[in-house]
Amino acid sequence: MLNLKDEQLIRNHSYINGSWHSSESQLEVVNPATGNLVTKVADATPKEAELTVKSAKDALSSWSQKSANERAGLMRNWFNLMMQHQDDLALILTLEQGKPLAEAKGEIAYGASYIEWFAEEGKRLYGDTIPALANDKRIVVIKQPVGVVASITPWNFPNAMIARKAAAALAAGCTFVGRPASQTPLSALAMAELAERAGIPAGVFNIVVSNDAIGVGKVLTQHPDIAKFTFTGSTPVGKRLIEQCATTVKKVSMELGGNAPFIVFDDADIDAAVQGALLSKYRNAGQTCVCTNRIFVQKNVKAEFIQKFTEAVKKLTVGNGLEEGINIGPMISKQAVAGVDELVKQSVAQGANIAIGGSRSEEGECFYQPTILTDVTNDMPVAQNEIFGPVSPIIGFESEQQVISMANDTEFGLAAYFYSRDVGRVWRVAEALDFGMVGVNEGIISNAAAPFGGVKASGNGREGSKYGLEDYTEIKYLCMGGI
Ligand code: SIN
């Protein structure tokens, strides 16, 4: 029906305790590029979410007692299957989310890379021995799986956001319950199908699909059998979920909103900065938390940067992500387009100028033109809010001190980028930016080996890297006496 090589990858039910679970009602998955129905999926209730938690709880002891090697072997099978089915998984992802097929293929490889990386890193979950204060004692530290992990993940990366949470959880010996965004459940369910084929035991990886964000959210944040809750999404929702987790004192990790500055100093390689800005801004039609949100350009290179950047943005092609040569797919919904359009209009009313784009695209209701706004100031709505769309506001600056203070003038602290070839400035600015991740002469920073995460209202905890694995463990101190 959808031209998949393997039709079994389309699954229409939640995956609970190794079986496909039907529910009384169904939700619709719609292709944002066309507005057409892709398929319907069983819409689970909070009661069914509780069942999912039970299944993860029941599977915990046997999974956590497997050796790290055994877990790694099964995860490696899962990684291999994801890569073998990369084309089908990408097609499913583009159909439900809209991003261009080449980008969707990239996301499948990106998501799978977390499974591969954590499978290996799970073997290196080292403890510690600490010199004791008394001769007849020894201090030993071991790391143990935190327990059942629940997650809520967004629609912008329907595969990779689940992969980087679930892979760390499973590698640490935890079991996992994921609730994907109801707009994009199919990628998560296809991952579950492949987890089963890989031999991951029933109950270890569960996916519960539901339109009832509040009801199911309450189960996943308040159920006493869940030890850790992890969320990727907006800051207002993250704050509410943290509050809910407080009732059972769960370990939480939150990957929330961003407002990334992208700074171009006058000693930068301008062509490299243009390429970096293009990638970090227009990836996924600007719908990523680490997307460049404000471009600061030093006064004496501003005209050159704007001219070259505008030329590059002019070449971006907007359209249905399934078609050849498309760079910018649809946004996730008409409401998302309206939000971006409003930010642009408000900023223009306050004095910003449109260098290119600046309005909806004729491709369809969910499309917005790649846009550049010039003469923006840091207090305009487009600079103070997370745009989450293909719009680049450009702000001029005079000095290093001035741009650092403008860049940090946001409640968010996820990603920042800057371009400079002065080694002293590189260190000064990297250290002064209040962000969890800084790309220095680099516009794409995410990968499995690096700690992804933010500070301030952008959240806490890290994903990817050895730090991301540790977030799924508890430290236990053993005091060995009588020696
Ligand atoms: C996100 O938008 O939250 C994730 C982006 C990434 O992994 O690069």
Image (cartoon, rainbow, N blue to C red):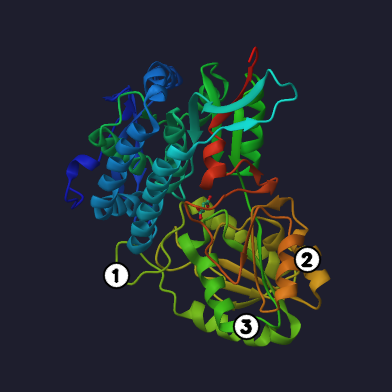
Gap in angstroms between the C-alphas marked 2 and 3? 19 Å
Indicate the amino acid at tag 3. Answer: Phe
Label drawn at residue 404: 2
Q: Residue at x 54, y 42 (%)?
A: 468
Q: Which is nearer the eye, 79 or 408? A: 79
- The relative height of residue 181 versus residue 382 in the rendered view (above or below) is above
Circle 2/circle 3 CB separation < 8 Å: no
| Mark 2 / mark 3, whichever is N-terminal | 3
Circle 1/circle 3 CB separation < 8 Å: no
Neighbour tally class for label 1: few under 14, some 14-19, many 20 plus, Cα within 10 Å: few
- The relative height of residue 21 versus residue 343 in the rendered view (above or below) is above
Indicate the amino acid at tag 2. Answer: Ile
Relative image position of residue 242 (x, y in whole percent)? 64, 31
* Front label number (2 vs 1): 2
Quadrant of res 52: top left
- The relative height of residue 454 versus residue 396 in the rendered view (above or below) is above
Local secondary structure at mark 2: helix
Gap in angstroms between the C-alphas marked 1 and 3? 29 Å
Residue 472 placement, left or right of 29: right
Residue to which mark 3 is pinned:
305
Q: Residue at x 25, y 41 (%)?
A: 10
Q: Tell me how many marks there are.
A: 3
Local secondary structure at mark 1: loop
Relative image position of residue 215 (x, y in whole percent)? 51, 24
Residue to which mark 1 is pinned:
324
Neighbour tally class for label 3: few under 14, some 14-19, many 20 plus, Cα within 10 Å: many
| Mark 1 / mark 3, whichever is N-terminal | 3
Quadrant of res 262: bottom right
Residue 84 placement, left or right of 327: left
| Mark 2 / mark 1, whichever is N-terminal | 1
Residue 456 placement, left or right of 223: right
Indicate the amino acid at tag 1. Answer: Glu
